Amino acid sequence: MEKEKITGIITSKEYQQLSDNYKLKIITLNKQEIFFYSQQRHREAIWKITVNEKYLFTLFKGKKYWFLDDWEEVEEASQKTPEWLSKRKEELLEFNLKNLQSQSNKQSLEEQLIDLEKQLRNAGNREEVFLDYFEQFVNLLLIKHLSIKDKQEYQLTEKEKKEREILDKIVASWFYKTSCQ
């Protein structure tokens, strides 16, 4: 009879009515998913095992399936998370941070445009406000142009392809007009 000790976190525990025992699924520390069955002698104590807790299981293999022989709770389970889980948390945090940064950038640009509109309404010297607005607009166009100009054609989305086409026409027109003067 083959015996094995396995440490893992329980992902599910379901009662099997036909056999009058429990089917337990665990994920081991090396991300292997294992399922096994309890025995009749565990009927009274098996309810103490809780999902999402870490245990050290002693299993033996019957003819076809693994069966639970004994278990003990690993106390550091609540303090220590598996490495793959902490990496996933870090990835999610980074993703959320990037989203927040892009959202704040959009909000700051919207606020700048609102401020410029207010300046246009309230300004006595509209030419200065227009030149300030025009300078910011040109800077935004330049930033957009620089962000997509070095990309290969297959890397561009449809929207970026149209933007590149429009920006190329603007740049060509600008060079033509400045060279003619």
Image: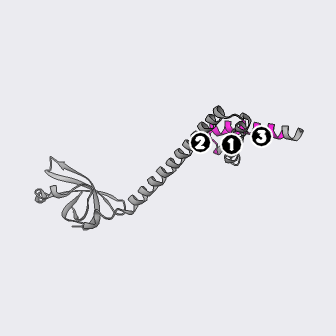
Q: Quadrant of the C terminus?
A: top right
Question: Which residue does the image show at 68% across and 42% down from the upper left?
Answer: 136
Magenta extent: 155-176
Residue 61, horizontal then vertical, whole percent: 23, 62
| In-image side of 146 versus 10 (left or right) | right
In the rendering, which numbered label is found on residue 136? 1
Instruction: Depth check: give the residue in front, 13 or 114.
Output: 114
* Residue at mark 3 to residue at mark 2: CA–CA distance: 23 Å
Q: Earlier in the sequence, mark 3 or mark 1?
A: 1
Q: Which residue position holds label 3?
A: 171
| In-image side of 123 versus 6 (left or right) | right
Task: Establish if 161 lies above or below 26.
Answer: above
Q: How does the figure colour the protein chain or chains?
A: one colour
Helix, strand or loop: magenta stretch: helix
In the rendering, which numbered label is found on residue 179? none
Amino acid carrying mark 2 in the image:
Leu
Q: Which residue position holds label 2?
A: 109
Q: Badge 2: few (under 14), some or many (20 or more) residues near its Cα, within 10 Å? A: few
Query: Which label sits in the foreground, 3 or 2?
Result: 2
Residue 21, horizontal then vertical, whole percent: 15, 53
